[in-house]
Structures are given as C-alpha cells and as structure tokens.
Image (cartoon, coloured by chain):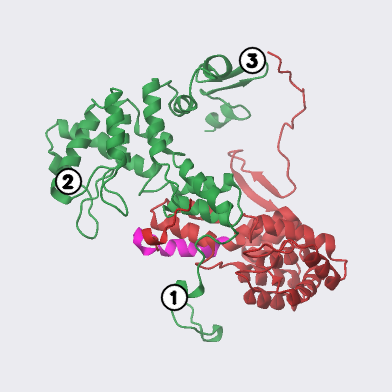
Amino acid sequence: MSERSRNEVFAERAATRITREIASEANPYLAERVEIHGYDLLGLARGTSVPEVVYLLFRGELPDDAAAELLTTWWISAIAPGPRHPATRAAMNAAVAKTNAVQFVPVATAVLGGAHLGAEEVRRAHRFVTAHRTEIPAAAAARAVGAGGRPERGDWHVVPGFGTRFGGVDPLARRIAALLAALPGAGAALAWSASFAAALERYGLGWLDTGIAAAVLVDLGFDEYAAAGLFQLVRAPGALAHAIELVGAPPTALPFPDEAHYVVEP
Amino acid sequence: VTALWDENRGTIRTRAGGWKINGGVSVYGYQLFEELMGRRTWFEVMMLSATGRMPEPRVAAFGELIWLCLSYPDPRIWCNQVSALAATMRCGPTTAVSAASLCCDSLRYGAWAAQVASEFLAGALPAHAAGRTVASLIEGCTRDAAGTPQVPGFGRPVVRGDDRVPVLHRIATETGLAAGPHLALALALDRELRATWNEEINAGGLGNAVLLDCGFSVDEIVRLWAMGLQAGAMACFTDAAAREPESFLPLRCDDVDYRGVASRTLTARTRTRRDP
C-alpha cells in the first residue's frame, strides 16, 4: 500500500452566518427558535414576503422597497416557463408516465440548469454583465457580433444571455426587460444590459430571459452561483403546475410521434 | 429520549465497508482491489452493493440482461425524452441521465413499477399455493377505465406484447434460472391474461419473477432497477446534444391547445375566500 494521509485538519463543526437554531431545553436536536441573519423566523413569516426573505438569505439584510419590488416583479415574470419549455415538458412527461410526483420539481429544475436558456447561461451572463458593464454598450455589441460565431443553423447566443430565440428576437423578453428597467430598483446592470440589447437589435439579436435574470440579480447583489440556482427555483412553480395538471392523465394525453414521424438517420 | 442520535452523533456506522487509508477498500467484506477488480464484473459488484451478497455470475448476468433490454435509444419513451430535452437545453450528461433516472421512479416502468410488480407476485404466490386460482388473482386487481385488469408486471403502454420476453425467458432457461415458482405463476398468469384479456407479461414482470426466484427481496429488486434505464437515456442525450440547441421536438405556440378561462383583467379578478 502506498496511500498516505495528507494529515489535513478538517473542521470539527460546520459553520454558517445565515441560520441560527436555538436548541430546545428539553431536546438539543430540536430547535425552539430559528433566526435568519438575526431575524426571528416567525417574525419574518408574519411581516415579510417570500422574495424579501430570499433576498435576506443571500444578502444578509432585508431589501428596501425598490429592491423588493424589482425582485418580486422579475420573479413573477419568470415564474411560468410555459408548456412548450423543455423543462416544463420534462415534468409533464414524468406526470403522464406515472412518475412519482416528488420527482417533478427535480426533473424540471435539472432541465432548467442547462447552458442554453438555463441556469448555467444565467451564471455566464452574470459574469458577462459584471465584466462588461463599464463599456459603451453599442461598442460592446459591435465587438461581440464582430467576433463571429453565428451558427449556420439554429439560434445564436452572441454572448451569454443575449441572442435569438427560435430565429428571432424574443418579444416577451423585450417587454419584460422594459418593465423591469423602468422600476425604481433597476440599477446599472439592467440599464447597461438594456442599452446593449437595444444595440444588438440591428443585428437581429436581443434579450434572452437568462440575460434578464442575470442583469436583475447583478443589480440586486446576488453572486453568479446564487443567480443560477435562483433561476431554477423561480421557474419551477410553472413547470410543476403543468405537471400536476396531468397527474392521472394517460400517456396518450401528450403526443407520441408515430413511425412516419420517427426518422432513424443513417 | 435522544440516545439513538447521541450514539450516532459525529460517527458514521456502516455495514457496507469503506476506505481505510493505506488499508484498501472493502465492499461488504470483499476487498475491492484484490478480490473484485479484474475478477468480478461491475454488475456483480453493483448487485453486491444493492444486497450485501455476492451473486452467482449467472444471476448477475441475468440482472444485467434486464438492464440491457431496457436500453431503447428512443426519445419518444418518457424518461428518454427527458434526457433529450435536457440535452437540447445543453445540460450535461450527468444532469440529463439523472433526470431520466428520476422519471423511472414510475408506476408505468422502472423502479416503482418493479416494486409494485414484485410485491404483487410475492403476495400472489402464497395465496395461489393456498388455493386461490390464477383467475381470482387477476380478478383482484384494479381495472382501467375500459375494465381491463391492471396486473402489475403485465401489459405495456403503447403496444400489446413484449418482444423482450422470449429472449429473457430463453436465456433464463438456458442458465437454469427459469425453474422457480414465481416464474411459474407469472407464466400461468400470462396464459390466463392472453386467453381472457389479450394482455401479456412484460419484460419487467418476467425479470422480477426470476429475481424473486433467485432469492432477492422486493426492496432489493427495487434497488437493482433504480438506475437501469441509463443506457437508453444516454443514447438519447448523445444524439440530442449533437444537434442544435432547443431543436428537439420544438413546439409552436399553436401546438398547445389552451382550454382554460378566457382572457381577463386583474382589476376584474375575484378571489376565493374561505369561510372563517
């Protein structure tokens, strides 16, 4: 045998700055009280909204009204990816195949994690916006387009979070971005991204929902990893609702391409 | 009150084995490097890990055969479609195949279906030995909307019949694994269902019967099935990942029928109130 321990010193206990659990006097495994960043959980439950507590969890402080409004407005705008979105369809597939309903959310969030319109693209877009938001947007757009890379077929994400959807500029993404950019809580990242997206339109490119998520979450101070995970969580309810709608439905409730529409290529 | 948790606090206890630095790796009593690597197949070690018992090579080969017969590279199959959808959104293969595996926690196919089918057969055998007829066992099952008995391990979505069954049965017979009572009862149920309801045993039903006859418990069979659909899911991932993003079975807005309420405005909405 030639394995040798590195003799690293591991922590004796996990540590966190987020959640404090105050043990019950009768049983040290049970918490009598819980505090999140110092706030009593039940007090938060009575006096705050879900987006406000999500902000608190990641940022350590409750948001002001403008930040809470921005987070809530983006959250609702992203909450329903719709029955055509692959993540929703994955959950709907699971439902008609009588998959255990506890799997619907993990299946949908898994598909929401991808590098194409998913959480991984949000993370990359967060990094892009953070790195480039001091540049002149039109120049950044021209440079990005000039760098090339447009595929012969299919969509082009010229940079993470910006590009085409089904060959065109996504009109709903454009409307959502305009709504968010007009809010008092919108900051420099949303403003820069809006100008960048506007500059891209002359090239037939524009906002993607991943870019919107990144810009909003940069402005709200979430890091790229939190942004990626939040994107999955925020979109999950819509996917889950469509799956639940199909619980008890037979497999025939969804299309199953027949042999004429199933082409095995050589 | 808390003695159980105090005993285990800060300490991991396991019967599976593990890794001792400079002392090798043991898997349920077998040394991974000396006794398993190069001497046993991966599937034998997987079965060992799922049961704590080293299977006979022919039993492990039959278990692997069940996994093999699930390896349809067809993205119309629900779990495979999830893998393809994940691929088209540029998720990685781990995500795609894991999501597909989660879908296999399903009553129509996969581990949950294997559990229900194994429980049914394991319960039916003593009942049959005590005198209950095959027809009565079928009569005791729930029925679908058309009145057809839903016998776990029998029938399939999309098609009647299962081309995998004769292959599994032949190989089980050739390897001496087809002589047990669970399989005999399963085949008797198959004959009755063919005669009365035009339904047949499926691959899972036959495979589970053989595994029960090999001495596996229902819980162990569920563990053996847990990841069995990976090859088909991986094939569908591989193909969809090589094509343009979001190009797998794209849907236009009008490809979905909306059957909900008509458009309405927020100011006109009504809220449902609960009585206090």
**Mark 1: which secondary structure?**
loop
Residue range (magenta): A236-254
The image shows residue B269, relative to residue A229, as above or below, that is below
Seen at 72% across and 63% down, the residue is A214
Residue A243, percent from left and from top: 45, 61
Q: Mark 2 — residue?
A: B194
Image point 58% across, 52% down: which residue? B241
Please name the residue shown 26% across and 45% down the image.
Answer: B154
Say which element carries label 2.
helix
Type of the residue with mark 3 = Gly
Numbered disc in front, either 2 or 3: 2
C-alpha span from label 3 to label 1: 63 Å
Rendered green, the chain in question is B
Q: Main secondary structure of the magenta part?
A: helix
Chain letter for the red colouring in the rendering: A
Foreground residue among A35 and A83: A83
Q: Which mark, residue B258?
A: 1
Above or below, comparing residue A244 to residue B254 in the picture: above
Q: Which mark is residue B23?
A: 3
Q: Does residue A38 show up? A: no
Which residue type carries mark 2?
Arg
Circles 1, 2 touching at the beta carbon (< 8 Å)? no
